[in-house]
Image (cartoon, helix red, strand yellow):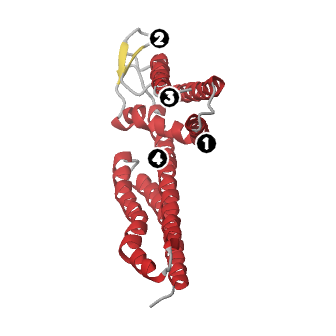
């Protein structure tokens, strides 16, 4: 029967292999996704569907930590240890599992952002093609960051022309822009989450002050104002939603405040 020390060493080796395999799998998923997007003539939906399957495999790898612990490691450690020190090994596995879940969530944001930027840069070239008046054949200008049909009046003959974009072009106006901006402000959003965690800790310890709340409110408002203004640069139509988007975030913040005692 293995000693407690031998079991710990085997457990450490197992966790190290999981961590290494996790990093390798993420890189393989990114490489495969980039290649598929290019090879599929920038079919974004097809690419993300394929990534969903890869993601399930990565999730299974993380879940293997808990499954292996429950089914194989814990029973043997309970027999080998004379005390409950084996609990520390459970915590070790749980900590790694938590870290890997966090890394996977961040990886997904980064990958979606990279793929969306590639898609945007490719598809935006569609509108670089000539769009001419149906009556006099004069070249017409359209708004390139407006991802829907547009009515353009010819400055030479006053004919109203309809620009009907390809499906790939209209798709930009949905999640693609959000993905790009999410990646661009990933670090800023992480910093905002850190501020929120610190505020929650102060609340739980009953050390929070009204000024702590005002500091977080300022950081929160500045972040979302920056975020929504950046979206407008990629999709001009979102300018009409700016006030509504900011109000929605303000309402969410006020709802959080009502549930929190300062």
Looking at the rendered structure, the secondary structure element under dot 4 is helix
Q: Disc 2 and disc 3: Cα gap in Å? A: 59 Å
Q: Which residue is mark 2?
A: 155
Q: Residues within 10 Å of mark 2 (few under 14, many from 20)?
A: few
Check disc 4 and report the residue beneath it.
Answer: 112
The one nearer the camera, 63 or 232, is 63
Tell me, yes or no, if residue 142 can be seen here.
no
In the image, residue 184 above or below residue 54: above
Q: How far apart, in angstroms, are the residues tagged by discs 3 and 1?
A: 26 Å
Quadrant occupied by the N terminus: bottom left
Q: Position of residue 216 (x, y in %)?
A: 61, 29
Q: Which mark is residue 187?
A: 1
Q: Secondary structure at mark 2?
A: loop
**Sequence-earlier tag: 2 or 3:** 2
Q: Nearer the viewer, mark 3 or mark 1?
A: 3
- Sequence-first tag of 4 and 3: 4
Instruction: Provide the residue designation for mark 3.
Output: 260
| Residue 91 spot, x, y in % from top left | 51, 64
Which residue is at 41% across, 9% downward? 157
> Disc 2 or 1, which lies upstream in sequence?
2
| Figure quadrant of the C terminus | top right
Callout in the foreground (2, 1): 1
Using the image, determine if residue 164 lies above or below residue 117. above
Task: Assign a secondary structure to mark 3.
Answer: loop
How far apart are the alpha carbons under marks 4 and 3?
A: 34 Å
């Amino acid at each position: 029967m293995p000693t407690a020390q031998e079991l710990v060493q085997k457990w450490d080796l197992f966790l190290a292999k999981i961590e290494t395999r996790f990093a390798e799998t993420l890189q393989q998923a990114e490489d495969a996704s980039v290649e598929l997007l290019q090879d599929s003539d920038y079919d974004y939906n097809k690419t993300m569907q394929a990534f969903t399957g890869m993601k399930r495999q990565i999730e299974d790898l993380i879940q293997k930590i808990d499954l292996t612990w429950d089914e194989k490691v814990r029973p043997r450690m309970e027999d080998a240890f004379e005390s409950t020190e084996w609990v520390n090994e459970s915590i070790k596995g749980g900590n790694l599992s938590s870290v890997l879940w966090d890394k996977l969530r961040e990886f997904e944001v980064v990958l979606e952002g990279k793929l969306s930027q590639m898609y945007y840069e490719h598809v935006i070239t569609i509108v670089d093609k000539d769009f001419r008046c149906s009556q006099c054949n004069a070249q017409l200008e359209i708004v390139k960051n407006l991802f829907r049909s547009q009515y353009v009046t010819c400055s030479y003959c006053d004919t109203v022309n309809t620009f009907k974009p390809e499906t790939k072009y209209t798709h930009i106006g949905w999640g693609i822009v959000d993905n790009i901006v999410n990646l661009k402000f990933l670090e800023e959003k992480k910093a905002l989450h850190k501020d929120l965690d610190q505020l929650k800790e102060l609340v739980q310890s009953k050390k929070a002050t009204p000024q702590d709340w005002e500091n977080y409110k300022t950081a929160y408002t500045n972040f979302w104002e920056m975020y929504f203004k950046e979206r407008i640069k990629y999709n001009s139509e979102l300018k009409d939603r700016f006030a509504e988007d900011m109000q929605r975030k303000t309402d969410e913040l006020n709802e959080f405040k009502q549930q929190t005692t300062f």
